[in-house]
Amino acid sequence: MKPPSAIVIASRESALAMWQARNIQARLAQLYPQCAITIHGMTTQGDRILDRALDKIGGKGLFVKELEDALANGSADIAVHSMKDVPMVLPPGFAIAAITERADPRDAFVSNQYASFAALPAGCRVGTSSLRRESQIRARFPHLVVEPLRGNVQTRLKKLDDGQYAAIVLAAAGLKRLGLADRITAILTPEDSLPAPGQGALGIECRADRADICEFMLGLHDAATDACVRAERAVSRALSGSCQLPLGAYAQLEAGRLRLRGFVASKDGKDFVRAELTADAGDPEALGTELAAQLRAQGATAILAALGT
């Protein structure tokens, strides 16, 4: 199939989203040097509503819908997303054409005064936009005060620098991509803070009927990352996962086998169930579904019921 003469990338206009779009733009330019690749910047509803927590306004899908509208009406050919922001079930007519090689999937502890969570005195304010992070912090450090923190990366760092929080937690990949790795005080291991499904991986979305685009994106696809992300998303999908659910899922590919860890918790971290499975990497979704069943058997169903999901 002949490469396209032009590709338009839909992207949010935040600094991190634009970095992600330009990264894909540059990589596609290497694959298809004769193709004109442009970026169509957009502001989504998730970017506009900053005074409420994501779980109160509809979840991370608010960062995706306007970009999908651009795909649907033909004003863009692909959209670039952080996979952790992509709803677990895509709307009819859309597909993930490629998932790129994963960057650092871990969370980062950022503070101007303290070296770690363990060093924070009782009553310190910790900022995070994620119920997943909040539940894990509350479970391990119940003496800390966890409060919502919205906005782009720079906005969150400014709130920390202005003294509104003693520490904040952000995705390590985002800080590194923006050249802000020096702001990371400590990297949180998966044992300390299990990542979100898809964290650190970029996904390229297109219309499902664009077989040409799906084919052209294969050069950016990373099979190992794809297997891990599919397993993680299957856990969340089986548990009705969204921003309204404190849930983590993280897979690692080791010698052709997937090690998958997951948890479900109450927001306050008092109810907490976790599970781990390792299996052949041939059917990531089946592994994720099985892990979700184990979590339910250990008490996740009751936690989900209490959360109203």
Image: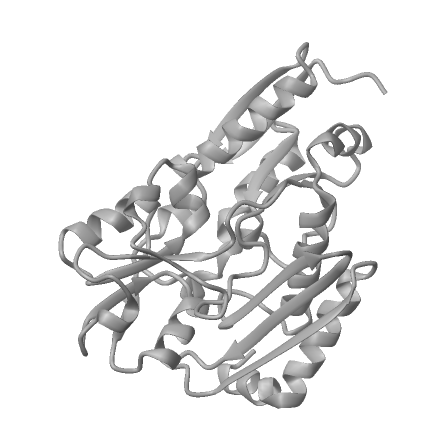
Is residue 216 visible in this depiction of the protein? yes
- Here the colouring is one colour
Residue at the spot 55% in from the left edge and 20% down from the top edge:
38
Residue at the spot 44% in from the left edge and 70% down from the top edge:
192
Corner quadrant of residue 274: bottom right
| Whole-percent x, y for residue 185 in the image | 29, 54
The residue positioned farthest toward the left in the image shown: 163
Q: Quadrant of the N terminus?
A: top right
Q: How many marks?
A: 0
The residue positioned farthest toward the top in the image shown: 34
Corner quadrant of residue 35: top right
| Whole-percent x, y for residue 223 in the image | 74, 45
Q: Nearer the viewer, residue 38 or 195?
A: 195
Q: Nearer the viewer, residue 143 or 268?
A: 143
Q: Is residue 82 shown left or right of residue 228?
A: left
The residue positioned farthest toward the right in the image shown: 1
| Whole-percent x, y for residue 150 in the image | 33, 55
Residue at the spot 61% in from the left edge and 25% down from the top edge:
27
Q: Is residue 134 shown left or right of residue 20?
A: left
Tell me: residue 159, above or below residue 215.
below
| Whole-percent x, y for residue 298 in the image | 62, 89
Q: Is residue 304 shown left or right of residue 233?
A: left
Q: Nearer the viewer, residue 261 or 160?
A: 261
Tell me: residue 231, above or below residue 49.
below
Residue at the spot 67% in from the left edge and 88% down from the top edge:
297
Q: Quadrant of the C terminus?
A: bottom right
Is residue 89 visible in this depiction of the protein? no
